Amino acid sequence: MTSTKATQIRRIRYALWGLATVVALALGGAYFVRMAVLRGPSAPVTTGEASIRSEFSLTDHNGNPVTEADFLRRWQLVFFGFTHCPDVCPTTLAYMANVLDRLGGEIESVAPIFITVDPLRDTPKVMAEYVRAFHPKLVGLTGSEVEVAAAAQSFRVYYEKMEEETAPDGYLMAHSGHIYLMTPEGRFEDVFREGEQSAEEMATDVLARMNGKQ
């Protein structure tokens, strides 16, 4: 990642989250519209508690192999995306960072995880530079195409490679934009989307669930 790109991401990170939707529309353009059409309903459809689960075998941004077992006993906030994403990913990760900053001392009980859907370009080194631009606690995960597909399947995440002449390497990745809240046992608890509630509201909701008040 170039220093210019990292600087741009940091500016997004510290921008007012309330403008994130406007920024996404301005930067995303046709890609955002196409992705919204392809990814279907705004929330995942589940048929039971076991439909969405934290289950994966991937590589973290430090090059270490990890599975869901490495994050047990901590609540997980999980988002799927890719580092070349022009809009949804940087705004959602900046939003997640704002949520994390509002968790206070409970942040140590949360594992914020960013899983790429573009493993061919998103190597551990690329992921390391990218996640550092958003939050020091953010963990970037990548792997082989098969491993990423299996992880996406366990979370019931949609993604698809799309040809785009103006994009780097001639393609983008359409993907769902949900943030999954998983329990310390790896079970599905809830799903959020940036723009549907403020960072403070989401943090309050997450804290209430962590403390058994919902």
Image (cartoon, helix red, strand yellow):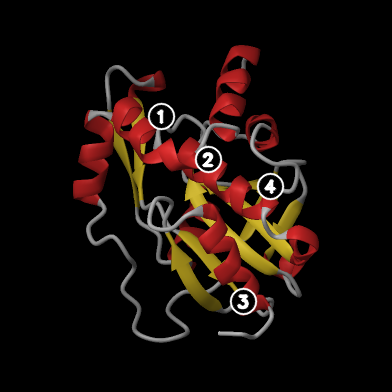
Q: CA distance from mark 1 to mark 3?
A: 33 Å
Please give the name of the residue rendered at 36% of the width and 34% of the height, measured from the top-left corner.
24
Q: Is 71 on the left-hand or right-hand side of 10? A: right
The amino acid beneath tag 4 is Leu
Query: Which mark identifies residue 208?
Result: 3
The amino acid beneath tag 3 is Ala
Label 1 sits on residue: 86
Whether residue 151 is situated above or below residue 190 in the rendered picture: above
Query: Would you identify the image quadrant in which residue 87 lies?
Result: top left
Q: Which comes sooner in the sequence, label 4 or label 1?
A: 1
Q: CA distance from mark 3 to mark 2?
A: 35 Å
Give the secondary structure at mark 4.
Answer: loop
Residue nearer the viewer, 21 or 36: 21
Label 2 sits on residue: 119
The amino acid beneath tag 1 is Pro
Q: Which comes sooner in the sequence, label 4 or label 2?
A: 2
Please give the name of the residue rendered at 76% of the width and 65% of the height, measured from the top-left corner.
106
| Residue 200: percent from left, percent from top | 56, 57
Tell me whether the residue at label 1 lies in contact with that at label 3, contact meaning CB atoms closer than 8 angstroms. no
Please give the name of the residue rendered at 70% of the width and 35% of the height, measured from the top-left corner.
132
Whether residue 152 is situated above or below residue 210 in the rendered picture: above
| Residue 45: percent from left, percent from top | 31, 73
